[in-house]
Amino acid sequence: MFKDKDKILSAAMIALGIVILGFCLKGGIDNFVNKDRVITVKGLAEMQVPANKVTWPIVTKEMGNNLQALYTTVNAKNSAIVAFLKQNGIDEKEISVNAPQVYDRDANDYQSTRSTDRYNVTSVITVTSTQVDKVRGIIAKQGELLNQGIAIVQSYENDIAYEYTSFNEIKPKMMDEAIENAKKTAQQFADKSGSKLNKIEHADQGVFTIENRDANTPYIKNLRVVSTITYSLKN
């Protein structure tokens, strides 16, 4: 009698084992079938912000044959420019007067003819400020220096530069927006394919760029974040 009970118990355990094995095999097959069912999408977030830092090189040039006279003229004009800046609200610590650069035409071996003016002196005063709107207003008024006989020279090498330096402060918010947009795109794909969106398999925080909004408004910056995210899909 005990032997019969042992046989029944053994058979029951074998049957249970077969059932469990069946579920395991089914789960394994499902995982194998679904392991390549993924979708990779990109999420975009953009924002326009005003620049919060400006660097304005103020370039003047003087030409002549007498270095001492040129030195006196350059110093006088630099003093006038600094005074103009201070009168318009620029702090002294935001102003940097660079050493003048002297070009001697007669010392140029490639100069075929002698020039009337031997020396060409370039002076650069740099304004570096977070008062972007104020500096822009002064730039618009720089023509007032002409009344003092001071001509500001346009130079591609010393162009006005606008920057946005607080990107790290708004980066998390933009990342969240980019991820949310990526999820919406993935969800649309899953709905169309009759699947359900599952967990994130891989995420790339993406590329961050800061560019001028356009050529005419370099003081407005366009921030852009593109994230790449891979989701798995399930039935």
Image (cartoon, rainbow, N blue to C red):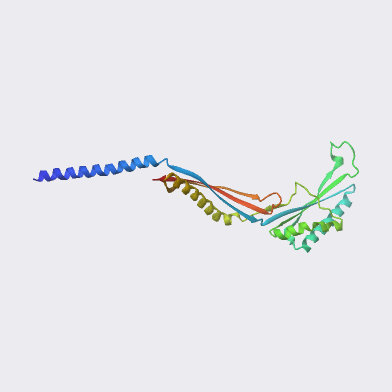
Relative image position of residue 4 (x, y in whole percent): 11, 44
Quarter placement of the C terminus: top left
Q: Residue furthest left?
A: 1
Left or right position of 21 against 184? left
Q: Answer with the quarter of the image where residue 85 lies.
A: bottom right
Frontmost residue, 136 versus 86? 136
For the point 50% across and 45% down, the residue is: 41
Quarter placement of the N terminus: top left
Left or right position of 218 against 146? left
For the point 34% across and 41% down, the residue is: 28
Q: How many marks?
A: 0
Q: Answer with the quarter of the image where residue 173 lies.
A: bottom right
In the image, is residue 174 above or below residue 192? Answer: below
Q: Residue furthest right?
A: 116
Frontmost residue, 41 versus 97? 41
Relative image position of residue 11 (x, y in whole percent): 17, 42
Relative image position of residue 192 (x, y in whole percent): 45, 45
For the point 83% across and 57% down, the residue is: 145
Relative image position of residue 3 (x, y in whole percent): 10, 43
Left or right position of 198 against 59? left
